[in-house]
Amino acid sequence: MAKPKTTGMTLIVKTVTRLTVGLILLFGIYIILHGHLSPGGGFAGGVIVALSFVHLMLAFGKDVAVTKVSKNIASNLESIGALMFLFVALLGFLGGSFFLNILSKGTPFKLFSSGTIIFSNISIGIKVGVGLFAIFLALVILERAEKEE
Amino acid sequence: MELHILLLFMILGAVVAVEVKDLLSSVIAVGAVGFALCLAFLILKAPDLAITQLVVEILCLIILIRATIKRDLPLTIEGRWIFNTISTVVFICVFLFFAWLALKELPSFGNPIMAVVKKYLEEGTTRTGAVNLVAAVILDFRAYDTLGEATVLFTSVIGIMAILRRPGRKKVK
């Protein structure tokens, strides 16, 4: 297959992507961390984080995005997110039952409040973001492999 | 009122998505239905669901467009259209009958039965410390359900990676 030298889209798209992709990633992290204060939470924030990497991949091609998050890192982080959520669940046994909120509740409307909910949000955010990006990566790799055949 | 306009728009978009011949147009019609659903969630005062619906819809549209834009397969429907139409109408009638039976028993729109919810609304913030009650319910009171949902997503990612990885496909040849 004759591969063109410049992968991805045009220069305009690449420049705009360079400016916006960090902001999208930050917004996703904000949604995850403020899941117990404002609408959103782990799932929505995780999808936004995945979308920032998908954005990078659509604009610059597969190779640039893979240098940021490779398939091995993706699958490792996915497992770490799932295990973290299970660990938060098992942490409740210290207080007596599954998923018990044993940490200090803090004052409402503060960022560090609500005990284990913030850790659950973070673990779900990692899991969802990396998992959806891994699905997209697998689909793109499949398309390229079909072209080569 | 706005909700009914949106519902009509969603039904029209779904009909267009089924009937149109071009695959890309069908995908875009499905996307329009999804964004209308996002607006409907906002009107029903569920911003959590609206955000999730919006971002998932964008991701699904990107994946579907990337998957369909290369291979534009024209749909061919041939033969037996009388049988198809009659069976479709019969099944729609059966569905509407049972939906009517079920909807008679439901509480009227906007007046939910506050048996379980009342306790969560009163004690949610004091018992969990989370101001967002949706987060309090899905990650504290009903966290076991969320664990199941997370497991479903984890399993689906494992399945997709196992099916689509390169070594598995090379062995077939």
Image (cartoon, coloured by chain):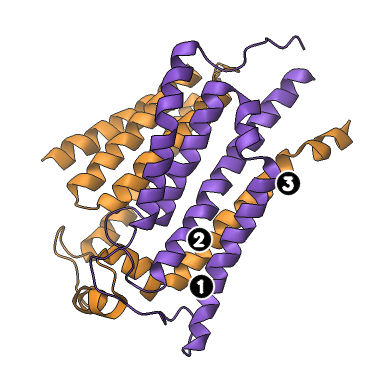
Chain colours: A purple, B orange
Residue that badge 2 annotates: A123
**Amino acid type, mark 3:** Ala
Query: Are discs 2 and 1 both within one chain?
Result: yes
Residue A12 appears anywhere in the view:
yes
Q: Determine whether the residue tagged by mark 2 lies in a helix, strand or loop.
A: helix
Residue B110 found in image quarter:
bottom left
Residue B152, given in percent of the width and then of the height, sits at: 56, 58
Measured along the vertical axis of the image, is residue B157 above or below residue A35?
above
Q: Which residue is mark 3?
A: B162
**Residue named by callout 1:** A88
- Characterize the local packing of mark 3: few (<14), some (14-19) or many (20 or more) Cα atoms within 10 angstroms: some
The structure residue drawn at horizontal position 56% and vertical position 28%, both measured from the top left corner, is A57
Which residue occupies the foreground of this view, A55 or B60?
Answer: A55
The answer to whether residue B80 shows anywhere in this view is no
Residue B93 image-quadrant placement: top left
Q: Is residue B141 above or below residue B64?
A: below
The residue lying at 66 percent from left, 47 percent from top is A73
* Number of other residues with Cα within 10 Å of mark 1, as a class: few under 14, some 14 to 19, many 20 or more: many
Q: Is there CB contact under 8 Å for labels 3 and 2?
A: no
Marks 2 and 1 close (CB-CB < 8 Å): yes
Quarter-of-image position of residue B61: top left
Q: Is residue A37 above or below residue B29?
A: below
Specify the farthest residue to the left: B1
- Residue at 62 percent across and 12 percent down: it is A6
What is the secondary structure assignment of the residue under circle 1? helix
